[in-house]
Structure formats: C-alpha cells, structure tokens
Amino acid sequence: MRLLLDLRHISEPAERERLAREADENGIWGVVVTGPQGGECVEASAIATTTHHVTIVVDVDGNDVHPTTLAEEISVLDQITQRRTMVIFRGTSTSKATLATLLSGLPSQGVILSPPPAQASIPTHSPEDIPQTKLPEDVTQLAAIIDQYRDSQTAFLIVSWERPIKELARHAVGRAASADFPQMVADMADQIDPIG
Amino acid sequence: MDMGIGLWCLQSTATSPRSFGQAYQELAEDARLAEDNGIHSLWLSEHHGYYDGYCPALMPAAGAALAATESLQIGTGVLLLPLHEPHRVANAANLLNEQSSGRFQLGVGMGYRPVEFEIKERDMSHRLKLMNAGLDVLRTTTQTPTWVGISSEKAAERAGRRGLGLFISGAFSKDVVNTLIRAHRTAWAKSDPIEDTPPPVGLLRNLWIVDTEAERRRALDWVRSSYLVYAGLGWGADNTGVDFVSQIETSMDEVEKSATVGSAEEIAAELDGYDVDLVVCRIGYDQPPRTALTEVIERIGRELTPLVQDIGVQR
C-alpha cells in the first residue's frame, strides 16, 4: 500500500509547497493537490516544479469541461512532472472513460493527445477508489489503522497528517508497504534521531 | 518599451525532433535565463491536436515557468479562448496571479483551425460569439491583465472598447501596426474609460541579434524554417484566406522581409517608431541550436533592452 499525503486542505500556497518538498525528501509516495476548477493542474504544476520524486496526485473537477481539454492539461502536467502524475477524477462515468482512454495514449472518437502523456498511461481513479483517513498522533493507533488498510488489499491510502512529515515517513511508509515492518527499529530511531 | 521573448510552443517538430520532457524542462531553464538577463516576459503559444505536440494547455506550462522564476512575467500569446470554458480560464488565471504575485499576463485569441473546433465539439462559425462571451466572463471574474491577439482594425476596435490590451501579429509593417493601434486607442477613448491611460499594446516580431552577414543569413533561414513549421498548421485550414501550400515560397519571402535581424543598435533603430509598450521577440524557433537560443536571450536582455527603454510607450 502506498501513502498519499493530503494537501488539499492546506490553504496557504507556501505551506503546501513546504509540505510537498518535505514529502519529496522523506520518501512519501504521493501528495494530493487540487485547485479551483480549471486551476487544478496549475497548482499541481507549481508543486511539481519544487519537487523531484513524489507522485503528484491531482484531484480534478471534470464537470462543465470538455474531457479533451482536461486530458490535454493533465498530459502537459505529466510532461512537467516527468511521469509523476496520477489523477482523481470527479465527474460522469462517460467523461472518466474518455479521459482514461486519452490518458492511456489511445484515441477517443478520433482524437489523440498531442503531446501524449509522458507515462505509458496516467492512472485515473474515482474518489471512491481511494480511501482516506486522518492519522492519529499515537503511534500504536497509527499502526493499527495502517495495518487494517494494508491487510484489506488497499492500493493507496490518502492520509491527513499534522505532525512532522519525517515522522509519518518513519512510522507509516514502511508499515504500509510491508506486514513485517520492524516497529522496534522506528522506535529506536526516535531515540537516536528524535524528530522535531 | 519592454522586451519579451516568445513564442514557446513546446513542440517536437519533424525538422528538429526532441523529447517533450526536454521541451518542458527547457521552458523552466529558458525562463530563468530570461529573468537573469533582465527580460520583461516570456510568452507561450497554443494549438491543439497537431502531430508535434504544440502546447495545448498553456496554464499548467505557465505555472511551471512562474514557479521557476521570481520576477519574470509569463504570458499566453495566445490562449484560444473559444476552445476553452471561460470560467475555468478565469480560475486558472487568478490562481497563477495569486501564486506569482501578479506576474501572469493572459493573452487570448480566436483560433482558426477547423480541426481544433472539431476536437472541442464547437462550431467554428460561432467563434466570434464564443470569443465575446468568453471575454464577458473574464471581465467579471478576473483582474488578470488581458490582451487580445488581433489582425484587423475591427478586432482592434473591439479590444479597445473593452479596455483590453492588444497583441499584434509579427508580419505587419510599421504603418499597419500603427494603424491598428490608432483604431484601438480611438475606440478605447470613445468608450468613456475610467482609466487615465490606454490599455497596453504588445507586438510580436521575428527578431535575432547578429554580428556578421553569415549569422544574418543563418538567422533568416531559421525564420523561413519557422514559417514552414507554422504553415504546417495552416495546411489543414481551408478558411484562413491563405493558400499555404501553393504560396509557401512567397510567404516565406514575406516573412523573411518582415524579420528584424541585425545588431542590437540596428534593431533598436528599427523598433523606434512603433508606438507599443512591449515587443515580444519571436525567437522560439525549432531549428537554432540550443547555444544560439541561449546566446540570443542573453543579448536581448543585456544589449537590446537597455537601448529600447526610452522608445515606444512610456508608462
């Protein structure tokens, strides 16, 4: 399971960028960003410019927009992020199907994206595909929640987190990835290299 | 007048193939270089569904360029408004301006390629209506400085009545340019404007700084080549009034004649007499080697910009 840090509720742009950079530096798999309708990929583009490794998950409103226009924006974003784009799409199933086809580099009703996505195919999800949770500060409670989602075959989990990003990385990323996460190592690391 | 550079189209053409990832990476690098050399602005250009990946989504590209810089203005020259949902354009423009402390300039135009209207399932015969409706939305939803790409007196007058800036094509003579500007300012003055000064005017110009005759010939060949790339877009259009295929050599000769190529002093003398606020030096050709492009960006900033500061419109 991979963790996606939710930045959608962070209103201050500088704070969003700081958190995204910390997620990037600490090995968080993805950050979730959005913006006003039409500005989602603008926001994602700004985050992409200040990061190098983290996946940029862009939450887009697909209502009242031609799906090709949205697909063009996301495809350009994927060039800017250099294959680090993933999509959460809010809209009709028909529009989502068109978008997913285009973002796979395939034609839809005679239209094909140019430039094509940088990735072979940009993952496109509905909001209900990806559970989200606010992680507690208590490490034992956090571990229980992560274990529960991981063991139920969840691919991605969107998390809200208000403590240092390095702490999330230390205690949750490895646990999300593997059932044999050695919690003792993370606890010892807290002693040897306290965070904050 | 201010000096900008354009048009960054982020293409991978048949004449100069490259990866798109490289194109977008170089956009950020070029923006930083322009900023470091005192250039006013960098302008992006839009088309849809063309084989070479001509940038179809300018707002994310502008976001990347703005995030990579601190003082450079980034503009769209132009975004094809009838092909977009105007409320989304306004939202994106507002966000870009918020993120960049007011460094985003929104240039809009109508578009002319039937295939682009087909892709977006819009009736091209309604493009003027779509354009005006879009401008109405922008007027009430964004404070972003807005420029309109025009090529006729009527269009210049429409922009003037709305209090919008002009973005004038590079192919016109000085007399035609100044005629368009007069039409724009007269219409603006008749509209009982609240502002004291007329909206700004930008001029796109094929331009290259050279020192020798050999460099001059090489730069003009790039200009001709760029027209060939551009004409490829027009070959699919049957209602532009231009027969791109049969007139290609003639058109390339005309584009070459309209290009401003010479020393910085010669170019400054040529630009004197244009009553404009901004000249966007069209240097974003696909054929010059990267070293030539970066060199001309540096020279526009360091040599030409100081020479033209006191000509044109002063604000």
Image (cartoon, rainbow, N blue to C red):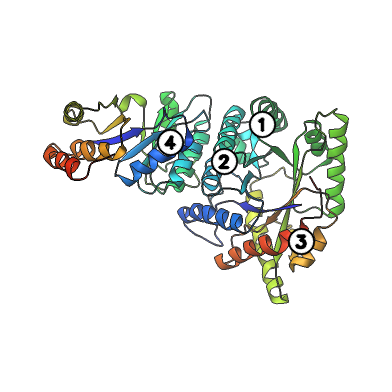
Q: Is the residue at mark 3 from the same chain as the one at mark 2?
A: yes
Amino acid, disc 2: Ser
Circle 2 is placed at which residue position? Answer: B100
Q: Secondary structure at mark 2?
A: helix
Circle 1 is placed at which residue position? Answer: B143
Circle 3 is placed at which residue position? Answer: B307
Q: Badge 1: few (under 14), some or many (20 or more) residues near its Cα, within 10 Å?
A: few
Which chain is home to disc 4?
A: A
Q: Is the residue at mark 3 from the same chain as the one at mark 4?
A: no
Give how far across and how far down residue B267 sits, in percent: 77, 63
Give how far across and how far down residue A46 sits, in percent: 48, 42
Relative height, residue B1 to residue A87 (above, below): below
Question: Looking at the image, do the residues carrying marks 2 and 4 touch, with CB atoms under 8 Å apart?
Answer: no
Question: Looking at the image, do the residues carrying marks 3 and 4 touch, with CB atoms under 8 Å apart?
Answer: no
Marker disc for residue B241: none
The foreground one among B25 and B158 is B25
Relative height, residue B249 to residue B314 (above, below): below
Give how far across and how far down residue A62 sits, in percent: 47, 27
Marker disc for residue A16: 4
Give how far across and how far down residue A144 sits, in percent: 16, 27
Q: CA distance from mark 1 to mark 2?
A: 14 Å
Amino acid, disc 3: Leu
Amino acid, disc 4: Arg
Q: Which of the two labelled residues, at mark 1 and mark 2, occupies the earlier sequence position?
A: 2
Which chain is home to disc 3?
A: B
Q: Split into 4 quadrants, where in the image is the C terminus of chain B?
A: top right
Q: Which of the two labelled residues, at mark 3 and mark 2, occupies the earlier sequence position?
A: 2
Q: Badge 4: few (under 14), some or many (20 or more) residues near its Cα, within 10 Å?
A: many
Residue A71 appears anywhere in the view: no
Relative height, residue B287 to residue B95 (above, below): below
Residue B192 appears anywhere in the view: yes
Amino acid, disc 1: Gln
